[in-house]
Image (cartoon, rainbow, N blue to C red):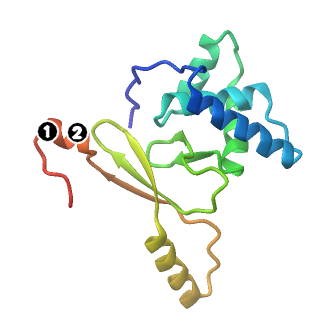
Amino acid sequence: MQMKPHQQSPDPSNRAVSACLERAELFFEGKRKRLTPIRRRVLEILLAQGCAMTAYKILDQLKADGKAPHPPVAYRALDFLVEFGFVHKIEHLNAYVACTHPHAHHAPAFMICRLCDKVTETASPASTDMMQRLARETGFVVEETILEAVGICPDCCDDAGVAPST
């Protein structure tokens, strides 16, 4: 599935983005991990865009910034941010989004619009409970639960004249 271009360019002066970046800096200092300039910029891009982006779209933004890292550099930065819960990979889109609840232990559920590719993160305690119950029954140990649902977002429902779920 091809990602649709996002109209808004990243705005590093955005207060919410700046606050998230400051929290990330403090978090990594406390973990004795380094939020390198590339890792920080990748997180900043995802926070500012507010939508799912492929690694290559992120690379394009880095190149527009005057940086020209090779794809492995971007993927390593993304892997690092995913490992520490600041970014999620959306398998359905092969793309990445900034986590809306970093540091919180949660099992995210993603609502992915099949028309505009908008991704909304929410918590999924019911699916987590169900998976844990099924795991106990089979002796499986669940380490992570991520739910991805594909459908139509409220904006696209309005545009297409489709009634949203209630």
Kind of element beneath mark 2: helix
Q: Which residue is mark 2?
A: 156
Horizontal arrangement in the rendering, residue 115 relative to residue 46 (left or right)? left
Q: Amino acid at mark 2?
A: Cys
* Quadrant containing the N terminus in the rendered view: top left
Residue 108 in the figure: left or right of residue 77? left
- Looking at the image, which is closer to me, 117 or 12? 12
Residue 104 lies in quadrant: bottom right
Q: Is residue 158 above or below residue 149?
A: above
In x, y percent, where is residue 122?
45, 56
Name the residue rendered at 71%, 40% in the picture: 23
Residue at the extreme right: 32
Q: Residues within 10 Å of mark 1 (few under 14, many from 20)?
A: few
Q: Is residue 73 visible?
A: no
In the image, 107 versus 80, the foreground residue is: 107
> Which quadrant would residue 32 be assigned to in this image?
top right
Tell me whether circle 1 and circle 2 mark residues in contact (CB < 8 Å): yes
Identify the residue at horizontal 50%, vertical 49% (top origin). 91
Q: Looking at the picture, tell me which residue is in the foreground, 68 or 17.
A: 17
Q: Residue 85 in the image: x percent, y percent?
A: 66, 50
